[in-house]
Image: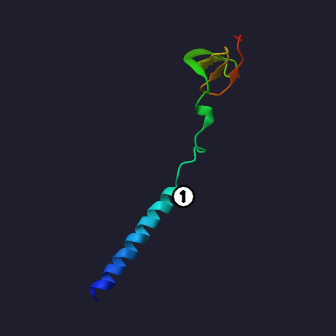
Amino acid sequence: MNEQTIALGAAVLMAALILGALLSRWYFAPTGSHRATLMRPQAAEVNDVGWCPAEQQERLHAYHADGSRMCWTCRTRTPGGAS
């Protein structure tokens, strides 16, 4: 093999590696759709223990600004003002 063939092969290899890296970054780019929205309350002010009507026992809840809360265990939502 001569030097020109080696240089051409190296250039083709580098171009293929760069193209493969760019395509893989595009193909595997995160879209955010894999995130679970139930795990993140949107406007939680504080987390505290409260009575869960679905489980009939004290559980950790996310308390929201409007007075409602969501049980972290079973995801039951209790409207504001309810005990």
The answer to whether any part of residue 33 appears in the image is: yes
> In this figure, which residue is indicated by the disc labeled 1?
27
Work out whether residue 45 or residue 11 is closer to the camera in this orientation and state it: 11
In-front residue for pair 73/45: 45
- Residue 54: image quadrant is top right
In the image as oriented, which residue stretches furthest toward the front?
4
Q: Residue at x 55, y 16 (%)?
A: 48
Element carrying mark 1: helix
Relative to 41, does residue 3 appear above or below in the rendering? below
Residue with the most extreme bottom position: 1
Type of the residue with mark 1: Tyr
The percent position of residue 34, horizontal first and vertical second, equals: 58, 45
Which percent across, then down, holds residue 83? 69, 10
Q: Is residue 60 visible?
A: no
**Residue at the spot x=58%, y=40% of the render?**
35
Q: Is residue 44 left or right of residue 10?
A: right
Locate the N terminus and report the quarter of the image it occupies: bottom left
Q: Position of residue 52 (x, y in %)?
A: 66, 18
Q: Relative to residue 12, is residue 53 drawn left or right? A: right
